[in-house]
Amino acid sequence: MGTPINFEVVCKQKYPNVRIKWKNRYGQFDWFDFYMVNKQSFSTTVRGYQPQLGTWTGATLGYNQYDSSNLNYIVDSKQSISVNTDWVPETYNEIFKQLLVSEEIYWVKSQTDLAPLTIATDSITFKTGAVDKVIQYTFDLDFGQGYKLIL
């Protein structure tokens, strides 16, 4: 008889893990690892104006070729992330309800790097193992801080 060899098969992850933690209804933090596909998006909303071109010097209007007739005065940005669960049991439905109503949500990028988030998903149809057999959910979250710093 020899010494048994223990080994663990670890499947290579296709997508990077996104760990989300949130304050549950009891005031404690829960977390969940979203191992499936995640997508980040970035969008902007631009408000512009048309300035008066050129300057009056004497009897004529003069302007430069590099003067623009369309300028932005406000540019707002929004960053978001969409995360997907792996196949989860029906018992996670209660935990995900608490994520949907949480006021404090973070993306845990490392031990010291947390990014504040807000939940953008406003409704979800909870599945059951008896009816749907397998259960997988998608959640949309908005970054709590915009791309540009506004003081």
Image (spheres, helix red, strand yellow):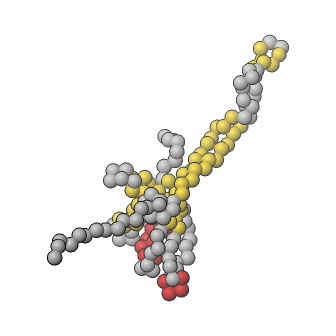
Q: Residue at x 43, y 52 (%)?
A: 115
At 39% across and 71% down in the image, what residue appears? Answer: 25
Residue placed at 32% from the left, 53% from the top?
A: 111
- Left-right relation of 70 to 92: right
Among the 4 quarters of the image, the one containing residue 40: bottom right
User: 103 and 66: which one is in front?
Assistant: 66
Query: Residue visible at 51% across and 71% down?
Result: 137
Figure quadrant of the N terminus? bottom left
- Extreme-right residue of the structure: 59
Q: How far across and down, in percent of the image, does residue 131 sit?
A: 53, 86
From what the image shows, is residue 24 above or below residue 69?
Answer: below
Figure label count: 0
Judging depth in this view, the residue of 11 and 75 nearest the camera is 11
Residue 149 position within the rendered picture, expressed as x and y whole percent measured from the top left: 50, 41
Q: Please, which residue is most extreme toward the left here? A: 1
Between 106 and 132, the residue placed more toward the observer is 132
The image shows residue 150, relative to residue 34, as above or below, that is above
Relative vertical location of residue 127 with respect to residue 68 in this rendering, above or below: below
Task: Identify the residue at the far bottom of this view.
Answer: 130
**Residue 137, can we see it?**
yes
**Residue farthest to the top?**
58
Q: Position of 28 compared to 87: left or right?
A: left
What percent of the width, then of the height, locates residue 37? 51, 62
User: Is residue 18 among the parts visible in the rendering?
Assistant: no
